[in-house]
Amino acid sequence: MSTVKLTVNGKAVSVDVEDRTLLVHVLRDHLNLTGTHVGCDTSQCGACVVHMDGKAVKSCTMLAGQADGSSVTTIEGIAKGDELHPMQAAFRDNHGLQCGYCTPGMIMSAIDIVQRHHSQGSGGQLDEATVRQELEGNICRCTGYHNIVKAVLDAAGRMKVAQAAE
Amino acid sequence: MGVEGIGARVVRKEDKRFITGKGRYVDDIKLTGMTHAHFIRSPHAHAKVKKIDSSAALKMPGVVAVLTGQQLVDDKVGNLICGWAITSKDGSPMKMGAWPAMAPETVRFVGQAVAVVIADSKNLARDAAEAVVVDYEELPAVADMQAAIKAGAPQLHPEAPGNQVYDWVIGDEGATDAAFAKAANVVKLDVTNNRLAPNAMEPRAAIADYDAAEEHFTLYTTSQNPHVARLVLSAFYNIAPEHKLRVIAPDVGGGFGSKIFIYPEEMVALWASKKVGRPVKWTGDRTEAFLTDAHGRDHVTHAEMAFDANNKITGLKVKTYANFGAYMSLFSSSVPTYLYATLLSGQYNIPAIHAEVIGVYTNTTPVDAYRGAGRPEASYLIERLMETAARQLKVDPAQLRRTNFITQFPHQTPVIMAYDTGDFNASLDAAMKAIDYAGFAARKAQAKSQGKLRGIGVSCYIEACGIAPSKAVGSLGAGVGLWESAEVRVNPVGTIEILTGSHSHGQGHETTFCQLVADRLGVPISQVSIVHGDTDKVQFGMGTYGSRSAAVGLTAILKAMEKMESKAKKIAAHALEASEADIVIENGEFKVTGTDKAIAFPMVALAAYTAHNLPEGMEPGLKESAFYDPTNFTFPAGAYICELEVDPGTGKTSFVNFVAADDFGRLINPMIVEGQVHGGLAQGIGQALLEHAIYDANGQPVTASFMDYSMPRADDLPSFNLSHTTTLCPGNPLGIKGCGEAGAIGASAAVINAITDAIGKNDLEMPATPDRVWRTIHAA
């Protein structure tokens, strides 16, 4: 057993877990943050993506102990109260989800994609081909990705506006 | 239509919980005292189970029980069943091999459960499973259909000599032979329809909770049809009578057919929860999904099409071998028969058709309905045949289709179906215009100058949806009726609850079903909620599959709404001292037509419940229900055209354009309809280019994770170019045909027709991987 200390969605938490416990199970089973999903166990599908210290990671492929001391943001932590994150709003407005199971991981990966491109100083100009390529690690069976890609491109614009306003 | 009525692109009501991580899927649910199940599964494709030694496991920490197949037998739990009876051409019934939920004696596919460990946590259950020793005696196995039907092949079931499930025929053999005897041209084609794994992103899961005091079970499960699950668990598996079993299917993460069926795991969880006296949870992992979720497709077909001198089709002969896997899954028998062969006429006027379908057992995962279920196999076959014929007859493939289109409706095909309406030229026109078919030759030449092989492929599909008229399917062997039910509950404050037997697992019913109510009453959809997925709340339902929820489920809601509105009008007329015939419903008010007298809908609702001043003899309350049984199937149809390039150096395919022109009748929410088409196209393209569930000769699956099975990713697919043509379905009052499966039905043939056009060789099987395409290009 180990004690793992994390900051999750801005709150400090401490959990005692078996050494073999994965980060996703700390989130789901110990902290009841069930928005992060498990879809494949082998790191392909991306339903489990969260942010650790601001970067997208697959929480099913990381021991909780490896995350000790880090700050984790899950799908439950990106809206500001009732105000949705621009990526959440863009997924809804563009019908970028159907069954919703891959959606939290998609949104967390997509935020990471947009943030990286914005910070790389490429003018924040994401194109469809880049979005499709960078979503390689997230599988959706419902949407055919068409509206997910639209949503990410839409959100990229909204996030840039939000960034400029800050 | 109003901003939230029929035809409006209303953003989905259900999205908020999904995008904020508040969806509630089965694995998200925790019950007090809950145990966890881990199944011990056969590593062999065919073996005798000689002994199961669980003594060491039972001594491990946190282990509650280890239960085996023999204990299921001892407790008289029923075997799994197939619910659609098919009769062979010799008059004999289909040969159903016994399928126990855990095998007491013989395992017949890799992944079949033999025992289950129940423990305090999932990890402890897994640890203990490692300590259970199962002594197997391996038997010869057969995974390939052609090998399975040969003399001397390993035999799976004593009930099924020669591994044959059935040998079934449809159509007029004599008339078809006569057509071929007179044919000017005959086109022949051999086609394999590759086996697919459905892979809903949420793995199957179940939580069973037995209440000993009430002798009552509750099952939370990943189901597309919770009432059907309850019916089957009660009537056939002897788990509990229906009034002692509540089935809840909360948020379900995709189904695509695979969550229609009742599987061993939920049966065992229910039975085990009573045995151990605590709730039992099982959540499958992805490899368990590959091993145990019913697979799709897996046909091998030889077909011949006869043409007269004017390129009119005069006859069609089809012989198909359909792989059932090791056991007959719940609706497996219907898929390669009544869901497949009845669509072999496609969009074409074919005077004579004869088809023979031979069902075959193999030591593989059972096969059942997967998005489209039989109709993709039929459409792929016919559209590959049409393309092959156009090449052989040296005519334009679009023109050959037009020459043979059905243009008069209703049209009785030689294979049961009576198409009610359609306009196949209109959808082909729309698709050809969208892709600039006329300009293709110039684009092909341009691509050639850059070293690329460009091809174009047409696919004109038709499907039978709105499943289904109960009497018709009953006459064909179905064990259930396929109507739908609904209830409209108006609360005293005028808010409305719609209870439906349809189940939404991505389809957006919580939005589209509200749109109907908004359309009829003029109330905002925020005043309406949709209740589904709980057998204790909803009176009954047959669930969601076969593109039926709008055509059948929504029509049931309409029928219940009409009854409710009729009573509400009487109440309004009484309150307004007007004639009922003069009452109209507009913008949430009941008005006396031609006057300014009106009463708001909530006041009508309140009047119904206060019952202080109702018309003489009227019962209080405002709640109505309806059962709707369709009169015919519906027939969505359309034209898909794919344009792509093949790199002759690598065999890699790149999409240039993919257009889809669909006729779904009336659209309730075009945004959601488009989403359904996108997803279907992705699955059809996935089958054509990427996906294949492969077994080695000994029945070992070699594609049992996402590392081995190629799921379509975002960069494997293009953006799609969609349009709609409309002929309203005359079979239901809303004119709806259904849209859930079309993409998966029509897409594969368009892709393969385009690749074979590009490379100039017709013989190419799915999935057309770069390796396979390269070899075909360079074959002698």
Image (spheres, rainbow, N blue to C red):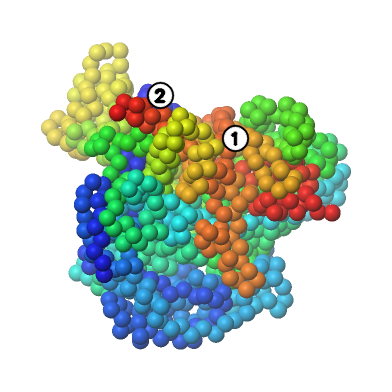
Q: Give the amino acid at mark 1.
A: Ala
Name which residue lies at 30% across and 16% down. Answer: B593
* Quadrant of residue B209 within the rendered picture: bottom left
> Is residue B290 among the parts visible in the rendering?
yes
> Is residue B485 among the parts visible in the rendering?
no
Spot occupied by residue B557 in the image (x, y as percentages of width and height): 37, 39
Vertical side of B285 occupied by B48: above or below: below
Q: Return the residue nearer the eye: B171 or B653.
A: B653
Q: Return the residue nearer the eye: B525 or B640.
A: B640
Name which residue lies at 46% across and 65% down. Answer: B288
Which disc number belongs to residue B660? 1
Which chain is home to disc 1? B
Q: Give the amino acid at mark 2.
A: Met
* Quadrant of residue B659 within the rendered picture: top right
Residue carrying label 2: B1
Vertical side of B202 occupied by B95: above or below: below
Name which residue lies at 35% across and 86% down. Answer: B55
Spot occupied by residue B626 in the image (x, y as percentages of width and height): 36, 43
- Under circle 1, the secondary element is strand
Which disc number belongs to residue A138? none
Marks 2 and 1: in contact by CB < 8 Å? no
Q: Nearer the viewer's eye, disc 1 or disc 2?
A: 1
Q: Is residue B277 left or right of residue B6?
A: left
Spot occupied by residue B284 in the image (x, y as percentages of width and height): 41, 63
- Under circle 2, the secondary element is loop
Residue lying farthest front? Answer: A121
Which chain is home to disc 2? B
Spot occupied by residue B566 in the image (x, y as percentages of width and height): 31, 31
Q: Is residue B407 left or right of residue B468?
A: right
* Quadrant of residue B450 within the rendered picture: top right
Name which residue lies at 39% across and 40% down. Answer: A111
Query: Which quadrant is home to the N terminus of chain B?
Result: top left
